[in-house]
Amino acid sequence: MGGAYIAYSIFTRPDGGSDLGHALGIIGTLLMLMTEFFYSARKRIRWLGWAGPLRWWLSVHIFTGLVGPFMVLLHSAFRFNGEAGWTMLLTTLVVASGFLGRYLYTAIPHSLAGAEATADELTVSADKIQSSLSSVAAKRSAAVQVLIEADATRKRRQRGDLMLVLLRSWDEWLYTRNLRSQIRDLEKTEKRRLSDIESLLTRRRNLERQIRSMEAARRMLSAWHIAHVPMGMALFGSAAIHVVATMYFKAGLWRLLW
């Protein structure tokens, strides 16, 4: 789409008031309305369970939430003056907020069906991993057993809610780098691959992190909703004013509709 718009702009000057400009604006706005309505409806109305897993609708929500604003941006022809500029600013804020919300959402573990996992479910999974580790360690050398025990008793970083959630990718990268370094050094002396140990330790660590950060992520996601929903309402209010003003001043919209 972006390439086609660039090619179009080479031969003519893009204008939000042209037929193409209005078409982009209308389609983009409809996609944004779909973003606002369909995922929320699927999440809140139980009898819509037949419509497919919630994770599918989240993917649609993300897709329309990106493509719609992008089409509105093309509709603006990159001119951000007046009320249209204010609408575009709100669109940018809502999209940026959506990225943050997606990141917070992924911090909360979910089942394959899209339902949020409970702390008890995560604890059961962690216990199973621990049993597997104990079984594997019993068949390995003392050095491998020391590595597993050291990982279990390692010092955990003490972080507040914000840092615990927002820096989780950084913490995961540090843990994975350090664990792989230790595994590779140990493989040289053991003369065998330890990928099963690495996989079990990583899975145990991820479950521990999820248990620690779950409630913090939920609290942050609740706070995010408080800010995101009003911004979305302000955006669609501003878009409605823009549409009404366009129709009132007859800036070419009637020709497109009729």
Image (cartoon, rainbow, N blue to C red):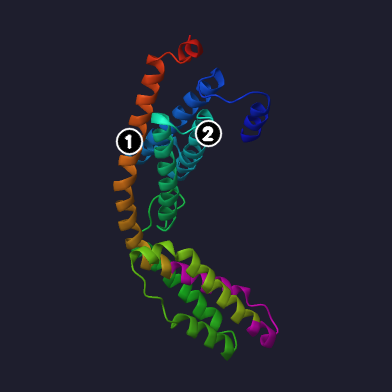
Furthest toward the top, the residue is: 258
Amino acid type of the residue that numbered disc 2 sits on in the rendered structure: Phe
Provide the secondary structure element on which disc 2 rests. Answer: loop
Q: Position of residue 245 (x, y in %)?
A: 37, 20
Q: Residue at x 57, y 74 (%)?
A: 177
Provide the secondary structure element on which disc 1 rests. Answer: helix
Q: Quadrant of the N terminus?
A: top right
Residue located beneath label 1 in the image? 234
Residue located beneath label 2 in the image? 78
Q: Residue at x 38, y 57 (%)?
A: 117
Dividing the picture into quadrants, the one containing residue 235 is top left
Q: Residue at x 47, y 38 (%)?
A: 65
Label 1 Cα crowd, 10 Å radius (few <14 / some 14-19 / many 20+):
some
Amino acid type of the residue that numbered disc 1 sits on in the rendered structure: Ala
| Above or below, comparing residue 55 to residue 174 in the picture | above
The magenta segment is 185-207
Do the residues bearing badges 2 and 1 touch, measured as CB atoms within 8 Å?
no
Q: Residue at x 39, y 66 (%)?
A: 163
Q: Position of residue 21 (x, y in %)?
A: 53, 23
